[in-house]
Image (cartoon, grey):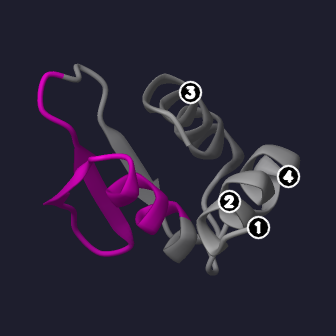
């Protein structure tokens, strides 16, 4: 199992414990581009995708609702 596959499996298994850095790397691997953000926030957008991903770093993790949004994008764009 590759490192990417392990990250994707970890997101699916426990959305309440997704590391901020892993979420950012997964978003980039799905074709999203880092568009900015301030402070503890990072915004990722993908061309022709109306939904953007916004991750907030809360003690190294992202909130569960943001992890669920990431799972939707994983399902949509493969992974």
Q: CA distance from mark 4 to mark 3?
A: 14 Å
Q: Pointer 3 and pointer 2: residues touching (CB < 8 Å)?
A: no
* 49 left or right, relative to 9: left
Mark 2 or 4, which is nearer the eye?
2
Mark 2: few/some/many CA within 10 Å (<14, 14-19, 20+):
few
| For residue 25, above or below residue 10 | below
Which label's residue is closer to the chain start, 4 or 3? Answer: 4
> Which residue is identified by label 4?
14
| Viewer-proximal residue among 62 and 27 | 27
User: Which region of the structure is painted magenta?
Assistant: 23-48
Q: Can you give x and y, in whole percent of width and height, for residue 5 in the image?
A: 68, 59
Looking at the rendered structure, the secondary structure element under dot 1 is loop
Q: Magenta includes 38?
A: yes
Labels 2 and 4: the sequence-earlier one: 2
- For the N terminus, the quadrant is bottom right
Q: Which residue is mark 3?
A: 72
The residue lying at 61 percent from left, 36 percent from top is 71
The picture places residue 61, in percent across and down from the top left corner, at 65, 70
Q: In the image, is residue 25 above or below residue 49?
A: below
């Amino acid at each position: 199992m590759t490192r990417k596959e392990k990250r994707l499996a970890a997101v699916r298994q426990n959305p309440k414990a997704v590391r901020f850095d892993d979420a950012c790397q997964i978003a980039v691997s799905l074709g999203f581009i880092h568009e900015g953000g301030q402070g503890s926030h990072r915004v990722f957008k993908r061309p022709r995708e109306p939904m953007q991903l916004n991750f907030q770093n809360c003690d190294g993790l992202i909130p569960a609702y943001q992890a669920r949004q990431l799972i939707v994008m994983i399902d949509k764009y493969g992974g």
